[in-house]
Amino acid sequence: MQIQIKGVRVVDPGNIEGIRDISIKDGLFEAVSEPGQLPEVAKDANDVKVIDGQGLIAVPGLIDVHVHLREPGQEYKETIETGLKAAAAGGITAVCAMPNTKPVNDNAQVTAFILSQAKKANASRVYPVGAISRNLEGEKLNDIADMKKAGIRAVTDDGMPVTDSQLMRRTLEYCKSLGLPVLVHAEDKRLADGGSMNEGLPATVMGIKGIPNAAESVMVMRDIALAELTGARVHFCHMSTAQSIEAIRAAKAKGLPVTCETAPHYFTLTDADMPAYDTNFKMNPPLRSDKDRAAIIEGLTDGTIDMIATDHAPHAEDEKQVEFDLAAFGIVGLETSLGLSLALVAQGHLTLAQLVQKMAKAPADLMGINNDIVPGNPADLTLINMDAGWIVDPNSFVSKGRNTPFAGRRLTGAAVLTIVDGRIVYAIDC
Amino acid sequence: MRFEKKDILDIDSLTREEITYILDTARGMKEISQRAVKKVPTLRGKTIVLFFQEPSTRTKISFELAGKRLSADTVSISKSSSSIVKGETLRDTVRTLESMKPDIIVMRHSSSGAASQVAKWVQCSVINAGDGTHAHPSQALLDMMTIQEEKGGFEGLKVSIVGDISHSRVARSNIVGLSRMGAHVTICAPGTMIPVGIEHMGCTVARDMDACVADADVVMMLRIQKERQGGSLLFPSEREYAALYGLNQTRLALAAKDALIMHPGPLNRGVEISTLVADGEQSVILDQVTNGVALRMALFYLVAGGSRNADSN
């Protein structure tokens, strides 16, 4: 199979910015050249697809470093196949799969299972993320090197954050020697105290127990201190508060090895946007105040926030159609991430190159891979139509999850072609 | 005026005119409970389901008597006797109830927003009898009815509310309702019981109990909800709470001479309120209970279409 994309504007920060012809063959980028330089292919060749890239943008395949694929164990919410096809439909060529499956990805067998299911799915890639502790219980380190051999790219206990500071210290030291980043879901569960939304006026009015900003920021501050102590790479997941961003900005100024991500809902929505008791607006961390939303955008603009990830968390409808405090946390994001993030470019908060940095290059760096569009690299590529207007319709999602707060929202910009390993895994007419 | 609301979910969704209309209607209902034969045929043939998922004595009996005095058929289910213990979801439970064609569902639930959600899931009227820490509209309305009876109105009245505001649906509904009717509401509690942003809901936060009670026309004490205290670190001991935030005769002397003492019950005597104050001349605690039946009769009458029918006749 050979693919030629002609006359496309390539945005690959640090590598290429300009109009190019791209040739893809046998899973790899074969050639990237000035327009008109590619050798003509035979018109009747069956296994060659030539795409007119005029007016479109080609970027290195987008990587979402925070996704819940739910398989094994909760296939009614999402399977590896539906999740990876949803990623492809959203222009995302690789996702990091969080370990809170049933059973937990805390051993090499589960890691191998995830990779083998992903291969069968024939869609986007998966980078499994292993659990730090046995069954996410926060007590005993897993055989992390064994899981690394099986294919994990990072470790985390995600939603069951490591409370024991000594265990966290040892995790960081151990993973530093293995060259694996540690992903931190920063939350002090005692401070969160079973809350269901941001602590603030909307929660007070609705009588919903609030989660204070400090539930997140105290753990960010602790783990910055541990990054300094150990010199290990710490990556903070789905940052939502002004205080966290402030702490990470200071840590970076000090030269500490910390990075972080935020999710589209944190720079798009606030707790005041939630219709009363709408469980599709319930996620953890929760939607914060407008002040926090502004701080997240500022962090994206000044580079404190390195990347955008979705925290894609599909749930079945009957897990959301219940009392607000009993409803499952989480929203889907794979198919709305690019459209929502392109709004940052339209609003002038980021250049397109900066957005590509945050959705493709920085995530690749965290995963320890190089996804530059250069001959010889695996051909993972997203082709974007910046002008495509569309309306979010959960019923048309590829994901099994319909739980989104963005239903009915008008977005501009969408992936029109997604290529993984030189294979077209998603395409709309272009 | 015609009362068009199908549901009574919280005070915030009621206008000043609607609140006044409910109170006027309730005043007319009060006389029925004083008759020898305490029954009128107004809601004959109507069915009211009392769905109480949380323990309640006075509110449930109050609603039940209100329905019976209007000749409605009332049935009640509680959490332990319902399919909830078998794992049925709230949505399934209320849709099942609705299939038996009730006219009104009165519901109490431990989750904030439950009544609002149910109102979207069913066609019949829903009256919120208390949802989590969100709202308890019938309680606030009966409190307003009692204040109006004694004080003649609300404009400029100084109302103090003392206690666990954070966990109180009664406080939230009263703050919204009384401020909407023109009263000045001041609240007081230890910092652990003051929710973020409460001052934007229509009240001021006093620095201590003496300042809160000073010159008050109404002092409303909230129950310390011992059942919600488990491990939540809201105050060190009942003794210390009573010393700082209990209403006793010394503190009561700071209020206006004719200040009303109110409490939604049940009382924790010696904790938030001393026995002498609770049983004293200024206490209207039992009048609140009496008015509760009349007020709930008014709510049934109005959501069942009473005023709409009256207008069309």
Image: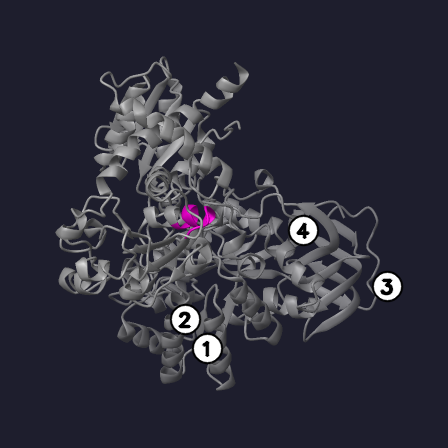
- Does label 4 or label 2 sit earlier along the sequence? 2
Answer left or right for A64 relative to B84. right
Q: Earlier in the sequence, mark 1 or mark 3?
A: 3
Q: Earlier in the sequence, mark 4 or mark 3?
A: 3
Between marks 1 and 2, how big is the CA–CA gap? 8 Å
Disc 2 is attached to a residue of which chain? A
Query: Nearer the viewer's eye, disc 4 or disc 3?
Result: 4
Is A396 on the left-hand or right-hand side of A261?
Answer: right
Marks 4 and 2 sit apart, C-alpha to C-alpha, by: 31 Å
Read off the residue under disc 4.
Answer: A411
Q: Amino acid at mark 2?
A: Ser
Tag 3's secondary structure?
A: loop
- Which chain does the numbered disc 4 sit on? A
Q: Position of residue B116 (x, y in %)?
A: 43, 38
Q: Label 3 vs label 2: CA separation?
A: 53 Å
Q: Are marks 1 and 4 in contact (CB under 8 Å)?
A: no
Measuring from the top left, give residue A272's x and y in whole percent.
52, 54
Amino acid at pointer 3: Gly
Residue most toward the right? A36
Quick one: label 1 or label 2, which is nearer the N terminus? Answer: 2
Q: Are marks 1 and 4 on the same chain?
A: yes
Q: Is residue A342 left or right of residue A117?
A: right
The magenta stretch spans which residues? B175-183
